[in-house]
Image: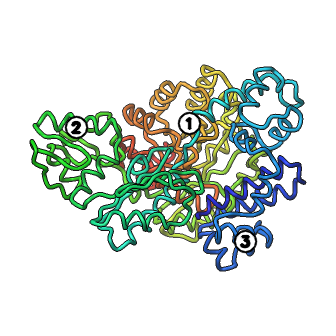
């Protein structure tokens, strides 16, 4: 059980307490504990086993004991007690963007809403708009949110799935009868959201591998079990499918079950053109199955360069592989600096020095500090001009302690509804870089939102557009914006666009990163880290850049600091 799962459980308790009308101090205690645990650099589960959790600021003795129960047993009695006090359908309503616990309580107590279906009926009957604090606009948003929840039902973010998949992979690999094993499917292709997890193993004793797998921790239900395949549902609701093949079938099976379906169709068509056939068991020349030891050999048999899993989406990858023109994809080790990092000067959980030390431990050469600007004072402790000037002095002091590393002084500045920036222009010109982001008025019509962003991109002080669509995967849809026009405007003004690596965002998506690359717009893979642990999110951003076909040259923060600053027109 990782930190995100534990934090999510505590956050759910906070929501339930709020729905039940508990006092705000108790609610905040669980919210604060969730943030503290999510921000830990070490595993909270291990700390719980060692009795060290209650030493973490924000985690009291009572919460620490509940987390220990969760880690030891996979369940929490207190959470189950709270769930028993409300209609279970209220948890589904909480998934609607902009509907928080207090709104859920009002809908339940005043309208008798207990599920998405009864909420939809209350909206279509126009009863929701009559509640205090709701109104016609809120009613419309809720109906749109119900559709959003329906579309995304049963899906998980990458960061919710990859740690689990890696743990299960290690467990399967530990079985002595297993020769090879790998995660397949959309996880291996690093898709932004996942419906289920696929694991492939090779063995001469498949039934023993299945039996071993079914003893893994966290399995709630066995959906099906056969001699070479089984499907289970974990306590989290994630479905995991395990397939076991003979070792000489492993490479073609790995390619097949990695997918995508569209890529496999192109691969089969390519094989047919040269007199071969491909399926999950191998490559056939007539009726004779060819020996295939690796995926590289499989692609070579088809006259193709090896196609990295991230590119296997059925676009132009087969044509490029045939011509030997596939890009050399950016790697995590190519990224030598990061921008868009927050500290506890605004809404981060660690101080500037702690964030910098984490960056240095990651082998990075520079870190761009970019706390929030003053427009967000009410919700993210945004910086005033006075505090920003004080922070500049603190960063200068810290930089005196290193010869191999530097903190770049930046800011994540709000782009106001009229397209202007919310800080003094003269002070902004003294920064090393400036990110501009949308944090308000997400409901603007597409033309106005696009004008707003494009006007900001024309501002001489702005260097980079942050999280360009504002989306939160599986919890908030993107605002309406013409991204083609935005990317073209960035190209015209020679501005950068962020690839926000936070796995709840991954914004831009791979398709639009690809379009930016085509128009010569560089991306910066930014962690948008609000905690020390958040710095590790870089791998998700790198994976998205790889899905877009980016090489290191397409990524700003693969460049040495002086070169990056020149590209930002700040050197």
**Looking at the image, is mark 3 or mark 1 nearer the viewer?**
3
How packed mark 2 is, by other alpha carbons closer than 10 Å (few <14, some 14-19, many 20 or more), is some
Q: How far apart are marks 3 and 1 (CA)?
A: 35 Å
Can residue 426 be seen by looking at this rendering?
yes
Can residue 351 be seen by looking at this rendering?
no
Residue 329 falls left or right of residue 287: right
Q: Where is residue 359 in the image (x, y as percent from the top left)?
A: 53, 63
Residue at (28%, 44%) from the top-left corner?
Answer: 327
Dot 2 falls on a residue whose secondary structure is helix
Dot 3 falls on a residue whose secondary structure is loop
Q: Where is residue 9 in the image (x, y as percent from the top left)?
A: 69, 57
Residue 347 falls left or right of residue 557: right
Q: Which of 541 and 139 is in front in this view?
A: 139
Q: Which of 426 and 199 is in front in this view?
A: 199
Dot 1 falls on a residue whose secondary structure is loop
Q: Disc 2 marks which residue?
A: 268
Q: Disc 3 marks which residue?
A: 56
Q: How far apart are marks 2 and 3 (CA)?
A: 55 Å
* For marks 2 and 1 on the same chain, the one whose residue lies earlier in the sequence: 2
* For marks 3 and 1 on the same chain, the one whose residue lies earlier in the sequence: 3
511 over 297 or under it: above or below? above
**Which labelled disc corresponds to residue 468?**
1
């Amino acid at each position: 059980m990782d930190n995100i799962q534990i934090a999510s459980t505590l956050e759910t308790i906070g929501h339930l307490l709020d729905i039940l009308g508990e006092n705000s101090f108790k609610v905040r205690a669980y919210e604060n504990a969730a943030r503290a645990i999510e921000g830990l650099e070490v595993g909270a589960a291990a700390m719980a086993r060692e009795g060290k959790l209650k030493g973490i600021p924000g985690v009291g003795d009572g919460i620490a004991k509940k987390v220990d129960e969760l880690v030891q047993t996979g369940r929490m009695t207190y959470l189950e007690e709270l769930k028993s006090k409300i209609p279970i359908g209220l948890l589904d309503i909480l998934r609607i963007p902009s509907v928080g616990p207090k709104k859920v309580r009002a809908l339940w107590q005043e309208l008798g809403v207990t599920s998405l279906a009864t909420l939809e009926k209350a909206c279509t009957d126009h009863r929701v708009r009559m509640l205090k604090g709701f109104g016609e606009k809120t009613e419309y948003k809720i109906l749109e949110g119900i559709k959003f929840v329906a579309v995304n039902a049963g899906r998980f973010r990458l960061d919710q799935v990859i740690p689990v998949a890696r743990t299960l992979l290690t467990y399967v690999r530990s079985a002595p009868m297993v020769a090879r094993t790998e995660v397949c499917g959309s996880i291996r292709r690093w898709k932004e959201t996942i419906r289920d997890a696929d694991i492939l193993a090779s063995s001469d004793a498949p039934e023993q591998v299945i039996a071993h797998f079914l003893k893994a921790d966290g399995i709630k239900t066995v959906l099906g079990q056969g001699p070479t395949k089984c499907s289970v549902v974990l306590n989290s609701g994630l479905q995991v499918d395990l397939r076991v093949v003979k070792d000489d079938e492993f490479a073609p099976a790995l390619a097949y079950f990695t997918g995508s379906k569209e890529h496999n169709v192109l691969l089969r068509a390519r094989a047919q053109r040269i007199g071969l056939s491909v399926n999950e068991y191998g490559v056939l020349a007539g009726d004779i199955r060819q020996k295939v030891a690796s995926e590289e050999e499989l692609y070579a048999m088809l006259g193709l360069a090896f196609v990295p899993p991230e590119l296997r989406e059925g676009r132009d990858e087969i044509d490029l592989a045939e011509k030997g023109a596939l890009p050399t994809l950016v790697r995590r080790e190519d990224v030598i600096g990061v921008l868009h990092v927050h500290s506890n000067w605004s809404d981060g959980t660690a101080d500037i020095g702690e964030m910098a030390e984490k960056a240095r431990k990651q082998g990075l050469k520079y870190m761009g500090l970019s706390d929030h600007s003053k427009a967000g004072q009410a919700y993210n402790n945004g910086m005033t001009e006075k505090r920003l000037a004080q922070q500049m002095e603190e960063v200068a002091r810290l930089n005196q302690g290193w010869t191999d590393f530097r903190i770049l002084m930046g800011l994540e500045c709000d782009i106001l509804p009229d397209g202007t920036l919310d800080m003094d222009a003269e002070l902004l010109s003294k920064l090393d870089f400036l990110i501009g982001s949308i944090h308000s008025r997400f409901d603007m019509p597409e033309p106005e939102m696009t004008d707003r962003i494009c006007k900001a991109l024309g501002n001489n002080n702005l260097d980079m557009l942050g999280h360009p669509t504002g989306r939160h995967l599986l919890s908030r849809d993107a605002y309406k914006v013409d991204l083609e026009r935005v990317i073209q405007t960035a190209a015209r003004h020679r501005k950068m666009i962020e690839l926000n690596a936070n796995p709840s965002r991954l914004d831009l998506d791979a398709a639009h990163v690809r379009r930016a690359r085509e128009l010569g717009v560089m991306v910066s893979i930014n962690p948008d880290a609000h905690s020390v642990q958040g710095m590790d999110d870089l791998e998700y951003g790198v994976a998205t850049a790889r899905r877009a076909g980016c090489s290191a040259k397409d990524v700003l923060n693969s460049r040495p600091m002086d070169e990056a600053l020149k590209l930002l027109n700040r050197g």
